[in-house]
Amino acid sequence: MPSTPAKHALRILNVALKAADPAEAVSRHVRLDRETLIAGRQRYSLKKFRNVYVAGAGKAAGAMALAIQGILGNRITSGFINVKSASTKGLRRFVVMECGHPIPDSNGERGARGIAQIAQDAGPDDLIVCLISGGASALMPLPAPPVTLEQKRATTQLLLDCGADIHEINCIRKHISLVKGGQLARLAYPATVLTLILSDVIGDDLDAIGSGPTVPDRSTFADARAILKKYGIENRVPGDVRERLNVNGPETPKPGDRIFKRVQNLIVGSNRLAVDAAVKEARSLGYHTMVLSTFIEGETRDVARVHAAIAKEVRAAGRPVKPPACVISGGETTVTIRGKGLGGRNQEFALAAAIDIAGLKNILILSAGTDGIDGPTDAAGAFADGSTLARAKAAGMDATKFLADNDSYHFFERLGNLIKTGPTGTNVADIRLLLIG
């Protein structure tokens, strides 16, 4: 059984996950008043539209589609969504494609063509409700010739392995795609487009969430080439990818383009809202609470050591917050793959932190992905405390060797410290908790 600090940490995490629930997020921002759809501050008279289409992609797209169906009902003409897992029971008039993530697959490509077709077929008196959440970039692949899906997969894997961040990965994706970087809006013009967005991107940068299919794109082909050069992989990506990125146009649509005059992009959920809910729950449990940041980025091991250092400072000197304390952070780190083990950024964070807090009492560190899936594993993340390394040693495990091999999953699996929520149907980046007694 988990200790009291672990129970508290898991309870706080669960409250944060509920706050990120896609259906609740959509319902908070979108409602129907007779024949008027109200989204944020904008109003849409449904009497003016011949058809209402729903299209989109992402880990939370299924739950978001169910929510928008609950609002619009039979007013929806048809829908097409790409999801990671088909948890979409109850959807009517929708085609649902279950697709590969984080590496795109052929189902994703077929689904992306279906979504693009809806956009192309829509006319000036049609409304498209677009649903975008974390994972949409991989789940909606439509390679631009001469790039093939296999070449796009290879490029994505190279970028993941070299530690490129989400903005860099998405910049490449936009420029080897026919729908990303505002290009879905280009296909839909002159139809009206309402895009509801569940953000998994630090700072809620619209053109980075799902690679911004209906958002003006500030990046260029030159930026994409510079990223490949930065990581020294310009000669490792497939030749057709190099050929595509070496063109000078046509560029992705930029701010000020007329195609965006009939487009509304509305964020309905984010990491910040999940962190706010975690703060409230931690306070109810009696912790002095502090939000470190929701903008955390960087190499996972480095970020973990900084968090461990903060926990030590709180324990030793009562600053920047007095014990009992709960320090919370959000955002998304990256892992540079060096070993052959199994894990994800949240499990690796917990393992790196465990090494730094070894032997210290009254410190617990947890890191988890809000989507319930950390890397290519069935765990959302893991937690560790000052006794973790001693327990590992007793079980014949050397934590530093497991970390060097990027094998955090098997390390925490043997200790029983993996967090397994199952797919949550949402995705608003990661939540990290430091509990100091």
Image (cartoon, rainbow, N blue to C red):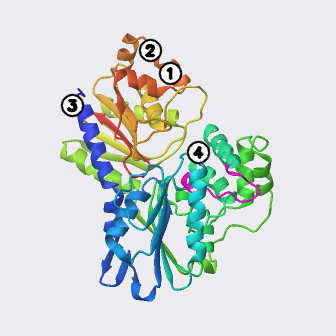
Q: Which residue is mark 4?
A: 103
Can you tell which of label 3 and label 2 is closer to the viewer?
A: 2
Q: Position of residue 214 (x, y in %)?
A: 56, 69
Assess disc 1: are there few (<14), some (14-19) or many (≥20) residues with their C-alpha within 10 Å of its C-alpha: many
User: Which quadrant would the C terminus be assigned to in this image?
Assistant: top left
Q: Answer whether labels 3 and 4 touch (C-beta < 8 Å).
A: no
Q: Answer whether labels 2 and 4 touch (C-beta < 8 Å).
A: no
- Magenta range is 137-149
Q: CA distance from mark 1 to mark 4?
A: 25 Å
Q: How many numbered discs sit on the rendered protein?
A: 4
Q: Which residue is mark 3?
A: 4
Is residue 437 covered in magenta?
no
Disc 4 residue type (three-letter): Ile
Can you tell which of label 3 and label 4 is closer to the viewer?
A: 4
Q: Which residue is mark 1?
A: 402
Disc 3 residue type (three-letter): Thr
Mark 1 vs 4, N-terminal side: 4
Q: Is residue 239 left or right of residue 62?
A: right
Q: Is residue 241 above or below residue 193?
A: above
Can you tell which of label 2 and label 4 is closer to the viewer?
A: 4
* Mark 1: secondary structure: helix
* Mark 3: secondary structure: helix
**Main SS, magenta residues:** loop
